[in-house]
Amino acid sequence: MKNILFVFLLVSSVLFGQQNDKKWDNVIGLENEGKVKSANEIVSSIYKKAINQKDEVQMIKCFFYQSKYLQILDENAQTKIINNLKTDINRVSTPSKAILNLVYAKCLSDYYNRNNYNINQRTNVTELDDDFLKWTKSNFVSQIDLALKNSLENEAILKNTPLTKYEAIFDYSTIEKFKKLNLLNYVIAENISIQSQKIRLYEINKKDLVAYKKGFLGSANDFIKSNFDSVSNENLRVVLKLYQKQEINNPSSENIWQRILFSKTLVDFDEEYIKALTSFQKNTNDTVVIQNIQLQKAYYLNESVSKATNSDHKIKAVAILDSVIKINNKSNAYKFAIQTKDNILLKDLNVQIRKYIYNKENTRAYIQYKNVENLKISFYKISQTELQQFIKYNLPKETIKDSIVYNNKPIATKLYSLKNNKDYLQYSTEVILPKLETGSYLVYFESESSSENLKASAFETITVSNFIVIASQNNVSENYQVLDRKTGQPLENVAITSPSFNIKTDKNGMAVFKKVNIQNFNNETITLSSSNDTLSLSKNYIQYNKEYGDKTNEKIEFDGEVKFYLDRAIYRPGQTVFYKGIAFQEIKNKASIVPYTSFDIIIEDIDSNEIKKIQATTNEFGSFSGEFALPKTGLTGNFSIRAEEPIDYEKDKIYDKEKEEHPFWENVSLKDSKTYFKVEEYKRPKFEVTFDPKKDSFKLDQAIKVHGNAKAFAGSNISDAKVTYKVIRKTNYSREYYSQESEVLETGETKTDASGKFTVDFIAIPSKNAVKEKLPVFSYDIEATVTDINGETHDAKTTIKIGYHDLELNALIANEITTKDKNEIKLTSTNLNGESKEIEGEIKIYFLAPLSSKFKSRIFPQPDIKSISDSEFEALFPYENDNLIDLKTSESLLFSKKINTPKDQNFALDFISNYTSGHYKVVFSAKDSFEI
């Protein structure tokens, strides 16, 4: 479907230059010369003539141009454009109304999407302001929906109106397809496009749509016959019915394909989906649609690949992509097929090596590769200056690498054969690197290739040095200790230089630089050197250590905050707000107030526009107070009051004029000192709604009664009030925080009785998609809205958790303990709603495996393809732990005991003093009151 050229996209005048009209030629000429005002005058004359002659196509075309020029000539362009649009809608006939209503909906939708954060802060009102810039979210939603509804009125007329009638205002690529379309085709497609933007996929649970999958993926007839009335997500329901309307009006292959493609977001992208595509492919002759179907099949194979089960999927994907590319029609599917195939065939290399090693140390590289069979690794000796160029973040490292590789010979090169399964998957392996002597090197990795552009390459730098440095700093000194990287012995007479100093280590390997001034350049490079070794590194890794140095001149930095207190939480427009602020500071973990200090107090509306700025100064108790009047008109919603640093704090009483220093403002890190309050047109609430506490036990598939109460603040009961309620079921699995699915289970209406009480009844139906063995927990959220006879409305919400089980156990203990300490396990037992439950259970302790004798964990992950044997690894890297412990197969029971909660809720581990160091497992078990 072709796109109408909307005004807010600044339509191109080139398109309309195709019309053989001298006046429009003049308009385009003036616009190109930058004479927008003159061009606008001609458009205005064309517009007046079009109105008189009832030439609606020209009227719409003029609207686009006038709107574009308004954005240049008038600061109130947005409001005027919308008003002009509403005027034109009332002037034209049904077909043109449909187009302009779409333009209206599109303009409002685009504006809302760009500004939705600020708009959503506004309090929703039902009244519609003349200025759309002041609308609330509900105003935008209702007006967009109304415009879209109006665009689809009189479908018979739209269907009998060829789209070519409006050729002057459309952009199209092929006139043949354009001539076949009617206005209803276009209007439905645009409705789908706009309404689809409202869908939030995170609000939709695919499992709830499984029943509709046949219709989603079936023929036009299958889809049209589907009943989507029970789809809980309103936005999705609207879009699905629009797709149905589109296929009723025009069941073309392209429309069916667009629907199936949309359905991909609603169902699992699985083999069933692929079968549906294959079936559709057999029933269409549309070449472009067939290409798109093939492309989706290739996408599925490419995405569903698995080394364990589907390692040939990328091979199959390439074969399908070749069938798409074979039809060289330059379609989008053809272009995407070429791009996807290139990505699959692409050679790729990622490498990891240790950056610092000692002289002739055994070392290896961790290689992740794809489509590579032969790997060449070259080592180039580089100077300390060249090494620093790689360290500095703002230099083009690829250019530096190329210069070294192309202008120098490597000091060593080694070839490796990598296992290539020819399945286009990425694998990992490790290779032993040659032993290197002291110095710095560029390590260049490259694959085989007949073309430089198709070659995979990667590079790293490595420094071979026997130096290792430990460093710390404070405001008065920098402290360094240089040790032998292999033995740990201190090294004497090692020179340490930087742009700021030149020092040497003593017999303990220590060297101290006394700072002359407080300035500290952490981006400097320091170089450690001796007669046969050099190490360069950046200073920015050195930790700041407050335990060293002279504290007398140390500048103390601290946190500060202003807390606000208002006389109420909600105000009416025009009311006076009384506020009080207290300033706090926390120095060395000690909190105190901030006296005699000035602050700027900023008050902002919901759009973050400043409506008042006040300067306040704290008294001897660190507080200040004041008042301000709210605007009588304007938007309502969440306003804010905050404290900031003033520009003239030198006037403060505590400002030190001799040192030219403010003890608070020049040392503080001020936290976000802001408080929000509501500004609403409101009435004082007269009653509240509450739910009774949950004391009963609940079971699935049983009738649940939840009791609530509406009671006036004066103490009287709210009787005969309307109660609307909604029950929402959410599904969680044990130990999972977020709900996996959400569904509206029931909605209904009831009334409060004479005592103000009401009851919500529902059946606790579990989700049919839940896996019972995984012990799902179903949270039933009950939301009730009570409206009294005066129209006052209040809400309340409660949650009931029900499952196939009714017991939750927890055993809490630190991940690592020592036998000499006093250790205990905290045991808790509750029902699903968090209420404590007394149980008889058992605690067991299992020994899993001893601690490893290796003090170093594995440097790199375990590779997919092991090229270093276990014996070789042990010989070359004796201190690394290369073994994976199977904790399940090696466990043995050491201890068991019957316990009762809450009596034994703190279970003492006073019997483990002789336990072997190693890995253990604690199991806390009890019988559930439900039969699972």
Image: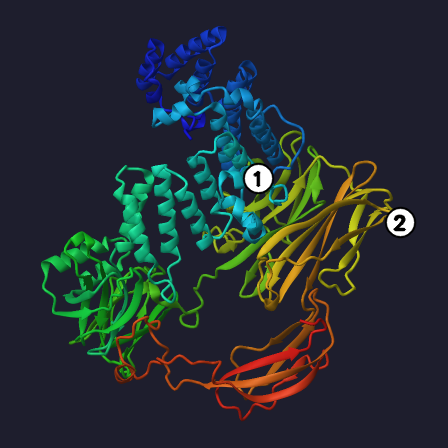
Residue 190 locus on image (x, y percent): 48, 31
According to the image, label 2 marks what residue? 755
Residue drawn at (41%, 29%), measured in percent from left and top? Answer: 2
**Is residue 290 found left or right of 873 in the rendered image?**
right
Query: Image quarter for residue 568?
Result: top right
- Per the model, the C-alpha gap separating discs 1 and 2 is 49 Å
**Is residue 541 found left or right of 931 in the rendered image?**
left
Query: Image quarter for residue 823?
Result: bottom right
The image shows a total of numbered marks equal to 2
Question: Going by the picture, which residue comes out furthest to the bottom?
Answer: 914
Residue 319 locus on image (x, y percent): 29, 52
Residue 721 locus on image (x, y percent): 83, 42
| Residue 675 versus residue 401 in the image, above or below | above
Helix, strand or loop at label 2? It is: loop
Question: Which one is nearer the viewer's eye here, 515 or 778?
Answer: 778
Q: How is the image coloured?
A: rainbow
- The local crowd at label 1, few if under 14, some if 14 to 19, many if 20 or more residues have their Cα within 10 Å, is few
According to the image, label 1 marks what residue? 225
Q: Earlier in the sequence, mark 1 or mark 2?
A: 1
Q: Is residue 270 visible?
A: no
| Residue 155 versus residue 494 in the image, above or below | above
Residue 820 locus on image (x, y percent): 55, 88
| Residue 665 versus residue 146 in the image, above or below | below
Q: Amino acid at mark 1?
A: Lys
Of badges 1 and 2, the one in the foreground is 1
Q: In the rendered image, which quarter contains the C terminus? A: bottom right
